[in-house]
Image (cartoon, rainbow, N blue to C red):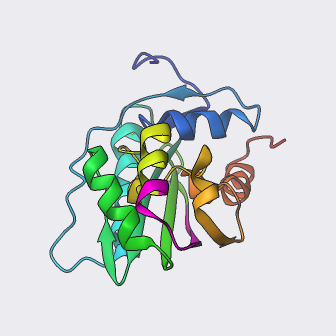
Amino acid sequence: MPSESHQTALILASTSPYRRLLLERLGIPFDVVAPEIDETPRPGEAPDALSARLADEKALVVAGRFPQAVVIGSDQVAVHAGRIIGKPGTPDKARRQLASFSGKEVLFLSAFSLHRLADGFRHAAIRETAVIFRDLTDEEIRRYVERDKPVDCAGGFRSEATGSALLRAMNSCDPTAIIGLPLIAVSEGLRRAGLRVP
């Protein structure tokens, strides 16, 4: 983690190892700082508003400490049948979530926000990924949860591992959005901030 006096050009405000690996693909040096925010949804808050707000708050809480840096905050929300689906937390809950998705569509909303407080720069966007699950048997779900252990993933689904085998289709304009950081859109924002990508 950078010191308060150290001025780095780019900071990822996230504890997610998946987002860290994605950002590394762009070949830009960056630091990682864990954002400390309350991620509780507000009463009646829409899924897209929740993901956008949390991405913004994560970036801002870190940008306040490093005003010269471009700070990336990101958040992902899964939506099924109009309801926000959180991280299961346990294998049993992951199995129940996946059983409810069998043969149905789940929408993943991946929001990010870039802030540089020194000059007021801000760039934010949300990218949607529609995931259509095939009909799943209880045994397939059990094997998947045992293998991938997706208890820390929204919807109990890890697309970067064997989760794709559960699907009939996936539709998105930004293929890494499902993993948690839409690199096409993030790259555009970083270029607007004056960073060289690639």
Left/right placement of residue 172 relative to residue 137 reads right
Q: Position of residue 151 (x, y in %)?
A: 35, 44
The image quadrant that residue 89 belongs to is top left
Q: Position of residue 9 (x, y in %)?
A: 62, 31
Residue 147 visible at all = yes
Question: Which quadrant is the C terminus positioned in?
Answer: top right
Q: Nearer the viewer, residue 126 or 193?
A: 126
Q: In the displayed structure, would residue 39 be above or below residue 107?
A: above
The image quadrant that residue 169 belongs to is bottom right
Q: Residue at x 67, y 49 (%)?
A: 193
The image quadrant that residue 28 belongs to is top right
Q: Residue at x 67, y 56 (%)?
A: 189
Left/right placement of residue 194 relative to residue 127 reads right
Write down the region rendered in magenta: 124-140
Task: In the displayed orientation, state which residue is furthest to the bottom.
Answer: 82
Q: Residue at x 51, y 57 (%)?
A: 112
Question: Does the magenta run of residues contain 134?
Answer: yes
Q: In the displayed structure, would residue 152 be above or below residue 9?
A: below
Q: In the displayed structure, would residue 105 be above or below residue 14?
A: below
Left/right placement of residue 53 relative to residue 181 reads left
Question: Does the magenta run of residues contain 65?
Answer: no
Q: Position of residue 163 (x, y in %)?
A: 57, 52
Residue 69 visible at all = no
Left/right placement of residue 46 relative to residue 196 reads left
Question: Which quadrant is the N terminus positioned in?
Answer: top left
Q: Position of residue 8 (x, y in %)?
A: 57, 25
Q: Residue at x 73, y 57 (%)?
A: 184
